[in-house]
Image (cartoon, rainbow, N blue to C red):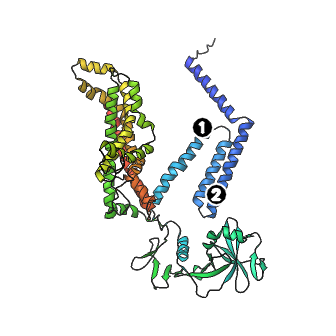
């Protein structure tokens, strides 16, 4: 007689869980309501993806358009086929990861190798059109062209009647072309099929936009453009620059200077003078070379890097020491009302950091701040405008904001260490401080070391505190980039990219890559040291 092997309780429980998971998966994938919702959601996603692909393909961006098309097909396959439940749950997270993390990092890396910035933020064709538009002058004794303003799909167009009586239509990016079936009144073209002619009220409502329209006469930008001031009559304008497409040069008709395309993303004269706007090009490692070789950029970069390390290290050290000290004090069983005091201790951590920084900026104001007027009897101490006092103020405010976090972390870590270890040390003759330094502190560091590393990385990029408290000031007027005495690397990147008249996105992206390499290297080394410390303990 064959005996059936006895199943253990663990096997029975595992089988029940598997059966339950299978029923949940079947319920999640079945039912007409779920199927209807799936079809509607996929239909909406497919419609948006199709529109995006059409726009990208029309703009000539085949790479991104193809990626979106392939990704959409993959998403449809995942959600329309049976099974593959893990993939259905992981797909949304992976998509958001690709869009908001990986794509941003890769795009920043790409920008670091270009000259993208003020005056170099478009294509060469756009730059040529911009130069011609910005330097237009009305042609003396230009013919007056009767004009009617038409409303097209998303844009305003000019319906022009030329001296020969023919009707022409054109827009900002659309050179004039003949219209065979235009409507005329009194020898003036006033309408065209498929367009709405603006009446007097429409001309008044759109007057600002109408006066900014310049319609190319032909595909050759040197032939000039038509512009109108009243929406009724247009005149011919030509640029002081003449573009030679064959030689790829711009000639200034007033001075005779020839500006050539020498591969720097702008038309350049023999003396180095450039005509802006230019266009975006790939420059290789030029931004990194500039960062480390140009004295006006290298010296501020070095000083900001040193201060960033000092700020991050002091921030972690001061908040950890104060938080640990308070945790030790409040962990003493002789301490009364510990719950009440702990609530007070974490109050700074409960308020948003940027609001606290703004409050401290007001309290440290040199003229009317609470610190000067109340605590120092009206003294005008430049807490935020003196280089060294501003750095001290940042460290102090960050200590106020950061010690509650360290207090909470070290409190939990201390309470997890058995008291028997300390008692055994005391029985062996160790004093209280020796027991803490040789036993509790190493065990504590094993628990909190990863948090200290993450805190260092956070303070290394603590943009909010710097920007809200001092704005990175006081400004260093000798630097070739917009930087101040209290700027850290991330705030300097922000200023280079977004503040001031000359914004250099390429250089800012290069700085971002340098920051990433620094933080990654330090984190890897620190985590390896943490592992060694853990093995030692």
Position of residue 207 in the picture relative to residue 183 (left or right) = left
Q: Position of residue 351 (x, y in %)?
A: 45, 39
Q: Nearer the viewer, residue 440 or 64?
A: 440
Residue sitting at the far left: 429
| Front residue of this view, candidates 16 and 3 | 16
Q: Nearer the viewer, mark 2 or mark 1?
A: 2
Position of 447 compared to 104: left or right?
left
Which SS class for mark 1?
A: helix
- Specify the quadrant that holds the C terminus: top left
Q: Position of residue 335 (x, y in %)?
A: 33, 22
Q: Residue at x 71, y 37 (%)?
A: 34
The x, y position of residue 20, in whole percent, is: 63, 26
Q: Secondary structure at mark 2?
A: helix
Q: Which mark is residue 86?
A: 1
**Could you tell me residue 347's position as x and y percent?**
42, 34
The residue drawn where x is 61% and y is 57% is 66
- Residue at 74% x, 81% y is 188
Q: Residue at x 31, y 60 (%)?
A: 299
Q: Would you name the residue on which mark 2 appears?
A: 53
Q: Residues within 10 Å of mark 1 (few under 14, many from 20)?
A: few
């Amino acid at each position: 007689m064959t005996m059936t092997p006895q199943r253990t309780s663990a096997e029975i429980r595992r089988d029940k869980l598997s059966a339950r998971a299978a029923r949940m998966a079947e319920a999640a994938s079945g039912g007409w309501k779920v199927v209807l919702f799936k079809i509607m959601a996929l239909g909406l996603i497919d419609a948006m993806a199709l529109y995006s692909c059409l726009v990208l393909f029309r703009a000539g961006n085949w790479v991104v358009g193809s990626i979106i098309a392939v990704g959409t097909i993959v998403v449809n396959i995942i959600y329309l086929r049976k099974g593959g439940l893990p993939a259905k749950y992981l797909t949304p997270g992976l998509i958001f990861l690709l869009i908001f993390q990986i794509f941003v990092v890769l795009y920043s890396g790409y920008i670091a190798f270009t000259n993208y910035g003020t005056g170099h933020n478009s294509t060469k064709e756009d730059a040529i059109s911009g130069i011609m538009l910005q330097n237009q002058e009305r042609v003396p004794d230009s013919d007056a062209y009767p004009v009617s303003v038409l409303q097209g799909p998303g844009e305003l167009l000019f319906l022009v009647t030329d001296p020969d009586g023919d009707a022409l239509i054109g827009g900002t990016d659309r050179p004039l072309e003949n219209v065979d079936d235009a409507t005329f009144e009194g020898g003036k073209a006033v309408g065209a099929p498929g367009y709405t002619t603006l009446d007097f009220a429409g001309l008044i409502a759109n007057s600002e936009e109408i006066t900014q329209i310049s319609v190319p006469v032909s595909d050759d930008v040197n032939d000039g453009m038509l512009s109108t001031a009243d929406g009724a009559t247009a005149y011919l304008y030509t640029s002081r620059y003449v573009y030679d497409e064959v030689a790829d040069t711009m000639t200034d008709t007033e001075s005779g200077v020839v500006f050539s395309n020498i591969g720097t993303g702008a038309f350049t004269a023999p003396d180095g003078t450039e005509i802006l706007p230019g266009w975006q090009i790939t420059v290789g490692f030029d931004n990194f070379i500039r960062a480390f070789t140009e004295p006006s950029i290298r010296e501020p970069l070095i000083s900001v890097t040193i201060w960033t390390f000092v700020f991050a290290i002091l921030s972690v050290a001061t908040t950890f020491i104060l938080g640990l000290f308070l945790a030790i004090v409040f962990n003493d069983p002789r301490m009364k009302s510990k719950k009440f005091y702990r609530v007070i201790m974490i109050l700074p951590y409960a308020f948003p950091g940027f609001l606290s920084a703004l409050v401290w900026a007001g309290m440290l104001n040199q003229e009317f701040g609470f610190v000067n007027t109340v605590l120092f009897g009206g003294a005008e101490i430049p807490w935020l405008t003196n280089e060294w006092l501003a750095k001290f103020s940042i460290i102090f405010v960050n200590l106020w904001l950061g010690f509650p976090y360290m207090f909470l972390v070290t409190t939990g870590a201390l309470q997890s260490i058995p008291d028997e270890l300390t008692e055994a040390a005391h029985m062996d003759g160790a004093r209280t401080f020796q027991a803490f330094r040789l036993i509790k502190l190493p065990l504590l560091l094993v628990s909190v070391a990863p948090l200290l590393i993450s805190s260092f990385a956070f303070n290394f990029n603590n943009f909010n505190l710097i920007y809200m408290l001092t704005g990175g000031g006081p400004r260093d007027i000798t630097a070739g980039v917009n930087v101040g005495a209290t700027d850290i690397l991330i705030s300097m990147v922000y200023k280079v990219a977004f503040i001031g008249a000359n914004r250099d996105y390429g250089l800012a992206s290069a700085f971002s890559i340098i920051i990433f390499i620094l933080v990654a290297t330090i984190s890897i080394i620190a985590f390896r040291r943490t592992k060694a410390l853990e093995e030692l303990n």
